[in-house]
Amino acid sequence: MKLFVALARTMLLGTAAAKTGALVEPLRMSDVALAGDWKEAEVRNQEVLLSLNHTEWSCHFTSTANITACAASHGERWVTYVKDAADPTTFTMELGFIGSGNDVKPAADVTVAKCKGDCSAEPTCKAVSFMQSAAEVNRSDGMVKCYWKKTSGYTHQKTNCVAPGGEGKPSCSPLPGEMGLGGYYGHYQGHWMSATAFLYNTTGNETIKEAAAENIAVLADVMAAWKAKYNVDGYLFPYDPVVWDKLLAGHGAKPYYSVPFYTLHKLMAGLLDQYTFAGNEQAYQLVRKMASWVHQRVEAVIASPGGEALWQQVLTCEWGGMNDVLFNLFEHSGDEMHLRTARRFNAYVFTARLAAGQDDLNLLPFPHANFHIPEVVGMARAYELTGNVTDKAIVDTFTNALWSNHSYATGGSNSGECWQAPRDLGNFLDSQTEESCTQYNILKVARRQFITSADASKADFYERAILNGIIGNQNRQDPDGATSYIYMQPLGGVNVKPWGKSDYGFPCCWGTLSESFAKLGDSIFFWQSAAAAEGAGTEDGSEAALYINQFVSATAKLRHLPGDISVRQEAAFPVHPLKTSTLTIMGAASTSTSMVGEEEEEGTSFALMVRVPKWATSAKNSVTVNGSPVAGAPYKAGSYLKLSYQWKAGDTVEISFPPALWTEPLNDYHPQHNATLAFMYGPLVLAGINMASDIWVPKGGTRTALQNPASFISRNEEAGAGETLSFKAEAQDGSSITLIPLKDVMAENYVVYFMTAGTKPPQPHNGYCPTSRSDNDRYHFAAPPADVDPVLSSAEPPGPPPSHVVHSMSKGASWRLVDGKIVGQTHEI
């Protein structure tokens, strides 16, 4: 408790701290024009976002406010058939659905009979869910979209209408498949507003701005309707305030809702993004009113007899990034109330041990990754704004723990949406590793850390995480209209990507991926002013600089410089074996008058900071300016190469960092996982495709795989002539497999982690949110046998923090701990 109190006092000091000032700033998305694959991904995303019906988009909001009357979508309802444990051919039907994730296999269009039959035959299948009309509920030959599930916990739902609405009002139906009572409905609308704001800022497409403005106007009507009913301004939510009465009294929000603050954050962030990136003034007025309403309700809890203890209990129900959006609002408003309210969103059970430098990720009462990563995003934003060192300590401890002890080769860090004990990942490597939402949020953390540090390692991580955990989570080959997304990207065993339609169902990852593919240009380039460079105390001067962080085809407009100057990057990475990218300076250069009265082109002085990636260890690394090699080679991997010139239009920089093949062992200390390996090409995780098993022994065995993967892996296309990247990998038995980047896997079955010892350790069955064993050996590093190569470092993870108090918590449902295990239902997000 002393630690918690000390943390509270330290955090509140941030309200009076001076702003640190960022070392670098991202270029505006409007100043970055994408090209190539990333532009195509942006366009696919835009098509989905603009295809949604506006009346359906707002139906949950308008019907609960009695502005419309709700009718079930297409006369269908969700049904779940739960398999009998004693007789797998018998099922019990319930009205309701099981959320995305925990799939036995990808959903498919089949008959009801085959849907149930496949579940009967598969031991890990516990239930099936699908949409079906009431008239067809007893038909076995009807076609449905079947979801085979590893869990039987479902959300009760007679229809996806959450309220009947106003009698005699215009009718509406919710978005197709959108969840109903007990879920986290309404969150997607916040993501949609953020995504369309980003797209408008990037493309300038007025159709996008007008579509968003139409929806925001409807939300303003909803807020006005609630004010007319309860005489309280600033309330905007897809259900009656009874949700909040229950939550803020410490009882959770069931049966009406699961995680109210989580959704409120998405709505407030979407409105603020519409103001910030699309200039919508109405959105700004709405989010300011919402912030005032939040402040009043939070302070009422603090002032109640329950006080801070009750508020901390409320914070055990997932609250997204409420601190982050309020910090962002404070930057615009300058209103100290927004800063103070942001500080209230600080769950000590999570942040206290991080502030003290302890890895507590698995020791949380509920170690749900996407519950907590948004909190860290807010802490990173707080440090950027206030300079509070406790914020920085929390963020640094978290990222150090995550990347050292909990991460996979992709940069992802969770299985079944939850964290496990440090370097104890092997038993949790399955089809539920890893979640798209967490990748989206950890990229936010890395980006914020880069802004305040200009540290190349943060850009290295960002590159690996976005290439392996975001870019490949949009289907580029979808034959059925709208593209598909992935909720959980499987990393263990033989899998196919479990695609789900991006315009149906709308779980959390559909929202975060919609945002991700709308802001792909936000972290390619960063700018450092001369003043910021001087303040940072750089050894080589205080010159303004453009940071080239990602090797992606795009053009950056440099508003910070006089004249119309841009830098165009044409990326050959990762397909070309040698070339990385070409930078071309475009635009007018400054002039001066010579001694003889003639004008001479001087050029414009600024530096290009080219990231030399951590993976760029080749002796063939080279950078040339207008064909001349840059002095100072070889280049230091994991740093920046500074190119300081008087740049003129037409100047070119050729960057060549040839990627190499290398091996990354699974981050697990158990000897039985010493031979569980992933193969890498530069920052890219390579997946074996069309394989029957993940047991695969490379030619030369595990030791060769660790020391020299190039001895058995070779490129299928040389000289970069083709547009694809694939490799041939030879096995010990003389056979071979094909490897391609995980991001390029679409319909193929694939393997990411290979069991190269020729055997596979037993894999326990893991359901939703599995956790490590809580015995006395959890933190003990058993010495490997003498004849086994120690693959991992011998450094132990941090010891366990002091015993923590187990609270009665709610994440849409109650749960408790018994012998270190979660007992009771949880609602998946």
Image (spheres, grey):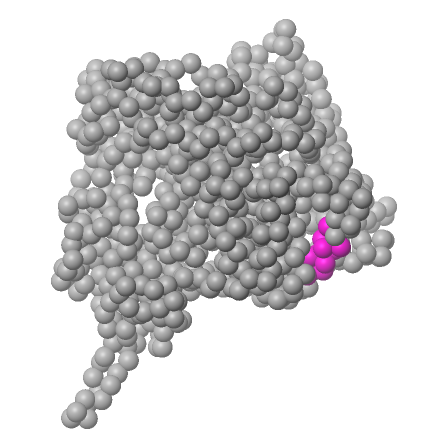
Image point 21% across, 17% down: which residue? 732
The quarter of the picture where the C terminus appears is top right
The percent coordinates of residue 827 (x first, y second) are 64, 31
Q: Which residues are magenta?
A: 287-298
Q: Nearer the viewer, residue 719 or 512?
A: 512
Image point 49% across, 37% down: which residue? 358
The quarter of the picture where the N terminus appears is top right
The percent coordinates of residue 33 (x first, y second) are 40, 60
Looking at the image, residue 206 sits to the left or right of residue 628; the answer is right
Q: Residue furthest top?
A: 86
What predominant SS class does the magenta segment belong to? helix
The percent coordinates of residue 177 (x first, y second) are 64, 36
The percent coordinates of residue 159 (x first, y second) are 73, 33
Where, by quadrant of the figure, is residue 464 drawn? Answer: top left
Q: Is residue 148 visible?
A: no
Q: Nearer the viewer, residue 642 or 302?
A: 302
Residue 540 on the magenta span: no
Q: How many marks?
A: 0
Q: Look at the picture and state if 748 lies above or below 85.
A: below
Image point 16% across, 60% down: which residue? 630
Looking at the image, residue 728 sits to the left or right of residue 274; the answer is left
Residue 291 on the magenta span: yes
Image point 25% across, 48% down: which residue? 637
Looking at the image, residue 541 sits to the left or right of residue 619; the answer is right
Q: Nearer the viewer, residue 6 or 436?
A: 6
Q: Look at the picture and state if 1 lies above or below 237.
A: above
Q: Is residue 226 visible?
A: yes
Where, by quadrant of the figure, is residue 718 drawn? Answer: top left
Looking at the image, residue 458 sits to the left or right of residue 614; the answer is right
